[in-house]
Amino acid sequence: MENKNIWTEKEIEGFYNNIMRETLARFPVLAGYKDILSFVFMAFFRHGGLVRFDEYAVGAYVNPDRLKGCYVYNLFIGIKDRVDPLTIVWSILHEYGHTLQPNITDEIHISPVLTLEREADAWDRAENKLMDFNISPADLESFKTFRGARLQSYRDKILPSSNIKSITNQEPQI
């Protein structure tokens, strides 16, 4: 992300305090991940973006926007049907990974294969950043399991095995 200097330090501090207070009030179990949350939240604020919860979305997402005349990324944290609050940490790290990528093209946007590659790259970037933090082996396994499930949802769009089996009456050959 390119540094935008849109917000003053006082504004950033206020945004940060508010979203951290809201996050820990909603999900007290995430207090042990405050360093990761802080990093991601501050990365968005320092680059002109905002961070909000989305009660209606299942996953986190980044929405590009123009604020104060600059192109910025806003982070929305979907919390609908979240069974494990820890997946919020993994999701926002993944969205941070997207901000490190070149802008998405129409070709990527319409191609399921290129979309899968872009998603995998964002997860790789998230995992690289995660290694900067002191996490347990169990947390790393949790991250990898969640990552695998999310990437599988993109693979299923390319080659839905259930559809192939019903059409051919055979298991797909991959």
Image: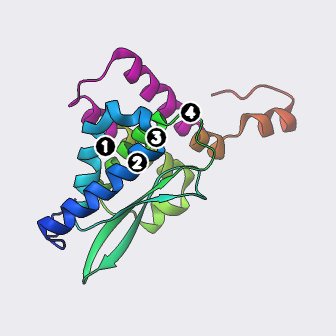
Q: Residue furthest top?
A: 137
Residues packed near mark 1 inside 10 Å, few (<14), some (14 to 19) or many (20 plus): many
Report helix, strand or loop for mark 4: helix
Which marked residue is nearer to the observer: mark 4 or mark 1? Answer: 1
Numbered mark located on residue 29 in the image: none
Q: In front here: 90 or 28? A: 28
- The structure residue drawn at horizontal position 32% and vertical position 50%, both measured from the top left corner, is 20
Q: Are marks 1 and 2 in contact (CB under 8 Å)?
A: yes
For the residue marked with disc 3, what is the amino acid?
A: Phe
Reading the image, the residue beneath label 1 is 37
Residue range corresponding to the magenta coloring: 126-152
- The alpha-carbon separation of the residues under discs 4 and 3 comes to 22 Å
Q: Position of residue 48 (x, y in %)?
A: 24, 68
Reading the image, the residue beneath label 2 is 23
Numbered mark located on residue 149 in the image: 4
Numbered mark located on residue 27 in the image: 3
- The alpha-carbon separation of the residues under discs 1 and 2 comes to 9 Å
